[in-house]
Amino acid sequence: MSYRIVKRIFGSNKQETVCDVDISHDILDFCFIPEFGYLFVLRNEHCISHLDINGNLNISWLGECGESGRRDGTGRYARMNYPSSICYMPDIKRAYVIEGGGINLRYIELDAPYLNSLLGIAVTNSLRKYVSKVSIEDVDTFCCANKYGQVFWTSDKLHRCFKYYNGDVKVVVGNGRCGYASSSNLLYSRLNHPSGVAIVGNKIYIADKGNHCIREVSKKGLTLFEGCPLDKETMNPSYLKSHKNIFYILDGNDVRYFSPSGPSRGIIHSADNIEGIGLHERDLLILERVNAKT
């Protein structure tokens, strides 16, 4: 098994293969950091791999490949438990990782590299009630962050969107029951396997995959932005990524773009082997699987 990363140049039809990624494990999520390279989340291996700008790959860059646990530390000494999503906030030069089925948030100091826990034991223990009835290795989370140090993430099995800020975690959207319901009271609303979140301006957008739509969170509450909950043929969105006033979603074999502030929208890339998407500033990065397992 191997992968490649394709870049679609913003505002044009140009695309180029940026690099090949020779990893024999499933990549669940990734991010690009300018002048540093790519970070890949290997959930089932409990580690994060690093591909530097010169093409050098370190599988156990953070965490020991195949060893689970919870331990802050440097390089292979650090331990994670089913990491599932990663994001990078250039304004504060910090990468965040969601793990443990969505109940633990860590951040990475890139130079060492060093893994730090943002949530204390008391906070993570208070979140355990949300994952008590699910297998954490099967929980998919997707995260994003803003320049204020707020981190948002969705959890598909928990049907919620969470927010971290200043040492605490709160539920932003969802009452935990799978379904479709909008309300001015966000905690009464329902999501159905949410699989992505992005911040555009002062609004939050959620890829509500099970409801085949994108939801918008604003002062008005939770509303429908795109798609149709009653028509599964409309879309199956995931991997929301945003840059300023545009966000991208992975919708089956298509990557779509939307501009909430205007009519700009459409399909920017199509392929039957897309595993995820990321951003290089405003350019789109597509992770494609080159060949399947044998």
Image: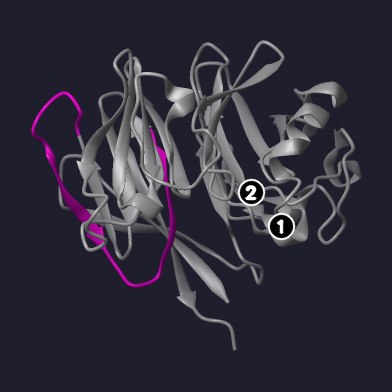
Secondary element at image label 1: helix
Provide the residue span drawn in magenta. 259-281
Question: Which quarter shows the N terminus?
Answer: bottom right
The answer to whether mark 2 and mark 1 are in CB contact below 8 A is: no
Q: Residue at x 86, y 26 (%)?
A: 121
Q: Residue at x 30, y 52 (%)?
A: 212
Say which amino acid is labelled 2.
Answer: Ser
Q: Which colour assignment does the render follow?
A: one colour
Residue 95, above or below 231: above
Can you identify the residue that label 1 sits on? 137
Horizontal and vertical percent for residue 19?
47, 59
205, 45: nearer the viewer = 205
Horizontal and vertical percent for residue 126?
78, 27
Q: Residue furthest left?
A: 263
Q: Is residue 258 left or right of residue 286?
A: left
Q: Residue at x 39, y 54 (%)?
A: 210
Can you identify the residue that label 2 sits on? 84
Picture mark count: 2
Q: Is residue 163 left or right of residue 57?
A: left
Horizontal and vertical percent for residue 146?
48, 19
In which image quadrant can residue 231 be found? bottom left
Residue 139, above or below 243: below
Horizontal and vertical percent for residue 225?
23, 35
* Neighbourhood count class around disc 2 (C-alpha, 10 Å): few under 14, some 14–19, many 20 upward: many
Q: Which marked residue is nearer to the observer: mark 2 or mark 1?
A: 1
Taking the magenta stretch, the answer to whether it contains residue 161 is no
Residue 292, above or below 31: below
Q: Residue furthest bottom?
A: 294
Between the C-alphas of marks 2 and 1, the distance is: 9 Å
* Neighbourhood count class around disc 1 (C-alpha, 10 Å): few under 14, some 14–19, many 20 upward: some
